[in-house]
Image (cartoon, helix red, strand yellow):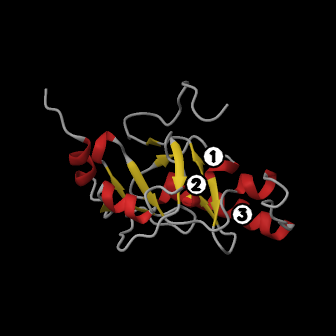
Amino acid sequence: MLRISREEVLKGLDLQTGVFTFQQIKAATDNFAAANKIGEGGFGPVYKGVLLDGMISSLRHPNLVRLHGCCTERKQLLLVYEFMENNSLARALFGSENSRLDLDWATRQKICIGIARGLVYLHEESILKIFHRDIKANNVLLDKDLNPKISDFGLAKLDEEENSHISTRVAGTM
């Protein structure tokens, strides 16, 4: 049986993403400084960092967070995404009093439509058909203009033509 490494699979996808070394990510986040920690994701802490150079994934849509690249050194998978100034929709709606945002109905509608557009792109319009399977306020990030962007594809599933998108297995956040 032929075994293919994670790095070979990533290269084979031709996602046009950058591959960063652990040292580059460490430098970009100032050695993962506490001051640069901006939250907790499903797989661990999330840090703000500044990269000298980055590339963008081939999955491009205004309502998807852009993947700039990854690092697979030290037996860890680190993903580098664009920075979202207004954090998550969950924080905007349910965060502490000083982190909550006053979202009028027009802005809320804009956010809902943006999320729907992102899902339509994933399901119908992109080269890879992807089912997110964990859409929730924590996984919708807001940019500086309060445009929603879907993030956290940890439970996403590729639509393989021979398999139905219908699954009886439980996925997502309880």
State the SS at label 2. Answer: helix
Q: How many marks?
A: 3
Q: Nearer the viewer, residue 82 or 64?
A: 82
Determine which residue is flagged by label 2.
Answer: 119
For mark 1, does the 10 Å Cα neighbourhood hold few (<14), some (14 to 19), or many (20 or more) residues?
some
Image coordinates for residue 64, horizontal then vertical, percent:
54, 61
Q: Nearer the viewer, residue 21 or 153?
A: 21
Sequence-first disc among 1 and 3:
3
Q: Which mark is residue 135?
A: 1
Sequence-first disc among 2 and 3:
3
The answer to whether 152 is drawn above or below residue 15 in the figure is: above
Q: Residue at x 51, y 51 (%)?
A: 123
Q: Residue at x 66, y 69 (%)?
A: 147
The three-letter code of the residue at mark 1 reads: Ile
Report how far apart the C-alphas of labels 1 and 2 lie in the structure: 9 Å
State the SS at label 3. Answer: helix
Q: Nearer the viewer, mark 2 or mark 3?
A: 3
